[in-house]
């Protein structure tokens, strides 16, 4: 059984790699932010949990936005872009939706 579109598979694999590395780097950052801004254990847990939910939503958003992305290489610049995109995902999603609306009309 052969893959239908190996280029699309390679592009998705690179994006998944970028997301995995970005989330892996962000988990300690969210723990640090939770300890920095939380005075009690419950506050730290709420901040940490909220930030982790934010990262999960960002990961899902990036997967949605890059559904038809061309093949990319996992360069340092691309990984940095993944990291920023996961944290700033509302901007990325808004830009994507505006771009698709403009194409539709």
Image (spheres, rainbow, N blue to C red):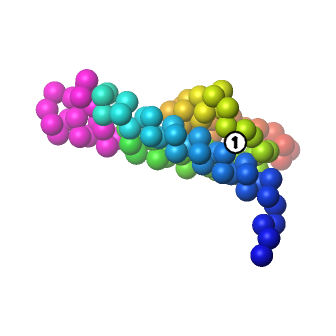
Where is residue 8 shown, x and y percent of the image?
77, 54
Where is residue 83 shown, x and y percent of the image?
54, 32
* 97 sits to left or right of 48: right
**Quadrant assignment, res 77:** top right
Q: Is residue 101 visible?
A: no
Residue lying farthest bottom?
A: 1
Q: Residue at x 56, y 29 (%)?
A: 84
**Quadrant assignment, res 80:** top right
Q: How many marks?
A: 1
- Is 40 magenta? The answer is yes
Q: Residue at x 73, y 51 (%)?
A: 10
Write down the residue under mark 1: 97
Please state the extent of the stretch shown in magenta in the rendering.
Answer: 34-50
Q: Secondary structure at mark 1?
A: helix
Where is residue 32 shown, x and y percent of the image?
30, 28
**Quadrant assignment, res 78:** top right
Task: Pick the residue in front: 75 or 63.
Answer: 75
Where is residue 16 shown, x and y percent of the image?
60, 48
Task: Pick the residue in front: 26 or 39.
Answer: 26
- Is 14 magenta? The answer is no
């Amino acid at each position: 059984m052969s893959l239908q579109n190996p280029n699309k598979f390679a592009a998705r694999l690179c994006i998944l790699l970028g997301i995995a590395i970005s989330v892996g780097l962000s988990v300690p950052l969210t723990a640090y932010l939770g300890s920095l801004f939380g005075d009690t254990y419950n506050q730290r847990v709420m901040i940490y949990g909220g930030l982790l939910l934010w990262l999960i939503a960002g990961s899902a958003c990036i997967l949605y936005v890059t559904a038809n992305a061309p093949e990319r290489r996992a360069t340092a610049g691309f990984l940095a872009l993944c990291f920023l995109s996961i944290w700033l995902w509302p901007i990325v999603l808004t830009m994507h939706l505006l771009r698709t609306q403009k194409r539709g009309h």
